[in-house]
Image (cartoon, helix red, strand yellow):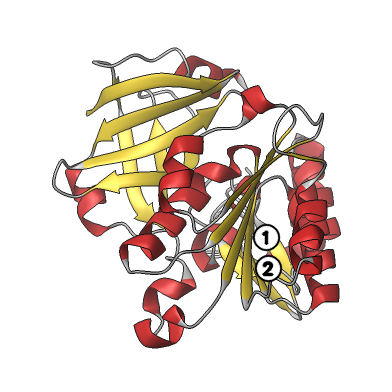
Amino acid sequence: MYKILKAEKLADKIFLMDVHAPRVASHCQPGQFVIVKMDEKGERIPLTICDYDREAGTITIVVQEVGASTTKMGELKAGDSFRDFTGPLGCASEFVHEDMETLKKKKMLFVAGGVGAAPVYPQVKWLHEHGIDADVIVGAKTKDMLILEDEMKDVAGEYYPCTDDGSYGHAGMVTTMVEELVNEGKQYDVCVAIGPMIMMKFVCLLTKKLEIPTIVSMNPIMVDGTGMCGACRLQVGDEIKFACVDGPEFDGHLVDFDQAMKRSQMYKTKEGRAMLKLQEGDTHHGGCGHCGGDD
C-alpha cells in the first residue's frame, strides 16, 4: 500500500497528493508517469509525475475529476492509501539527457493548458536547479482554474498566466500570448507544450509557422499505460508510435493531432475499439502487439 501523506484541493475538481513511494521517487525523471489503482478492483489511471522528493521518498500527483474513478480518487484524504502505484513509466524529457553546456545556451518556452501545468512544473524545476531559466505560459478558463502558480513563479524565468475570460493575466488563449512575446522580440530555440489535445494542436500550428521546434506530451490519450490496449496509438510523421511506451513526448510538428483526437473518441465505445482493432491489424497494440487487450 502507498500512503497519501498530503491531499489538497487546488481548484474545482483538481486535487494534489503527495504519495509515499520511495522506489519510484528514487528513479523518476521529469516527463515520466505512474499508474495508480485505488483498490483491487479499481481502474488503472496513468498520471504524470508532478514533483518528487528523493530524500522523503514521495511522488506528487495531480488528479482531475473526469470520470467515476478519478472522482473517487478526489475524495481520498491524507492517511488513505493507493493499492498500486507503479512507475516510473515512459521516457524522460529529452533535455534530461542533453549536454548541459549545450542546453544552457538554449532559450526554452513552456506552454501549459489547464492541468498541463502539473507535468510542466517538474521540467521547469529541473532546468532551474541546473541553472537554466525557462519562460512559462500557463492558460486556464478563469483565474480560479490556474494551478501551481506560486511553485511555477519560483522556478520560471518569466511567468505568463492567461485566462480565457480575461479575469487575470493575459486575456486570451496561450497562442496569442506566444505571438505577443515573439512580436516583442523574444526568441526561443524550443517550445514544450502540454495540455488538452486541441491546445497542443494550435500551439504546434503556430510554432511551425514561427519556426520554433516544439515538443508535446501525449499523456492525455493514454489509458492502459503499457502499450497493450491500443488507445494511445498515434501517427508521428511516417511512423506509428505509442504514447505510453515510446513517449509520452514527441515532436509536435510531426504528430497527427486530428487522427489522435478522432481515435480517442472512437476508443470510448466497445464498437469503436473493435473497429480500430480491425482497421489497424498488427499495429493496433504496442508492447507485444498480440495481447488481445480489447477482448
> At x 53% / y 68%, what residue is drawn?
246
State the SS at label 1.
strand
Which of discs 1 and 2 lies nearer the camera? The answer is 1
Q: Quadrant of residue 193?
A: bottom right
**Identity, as a three-letter code, of the amino acid under mark 2:** Thr
- The answer to whether the residue labelled 1 contacts the one labelled 2, judged by CB atoms less than 8 Å apart, is yes
Work out whether 251 lies above or below 197. Answer: below
Residue sitting nearer the eye, 287 or 167: 167
**Identity, as a three-letter code, of the amino acid under mark 1:** Arg
Label 1: few (<14), some or many (≥20) within 10 Å?
A: many
* Horizontal relation, residue 276 to residue 221: left or right: right
Residue sitting nearer the eye, 174 or 47: 174
Q: Quadrant of residue 151?
A: top left
Q: Which residue is mark 1?
A: 233
> At x 49% / y 15%, what residue is drawn?
72
Q: Which residue is mark 2?
A: 283
Task: Name the spot of residue 205 as percent of width and height, x first.
Answer: 84, 66
Task: Name the spot of residue 178 as percent of width and height, x first.
Answer: 75, 59
Residue sitting nearer the eye, 129 or 294: 129
Going from N to C along the chain, the mark reached first, 1 or 2, is 1
Work out whether 109 lies above or below 112. Answer: below
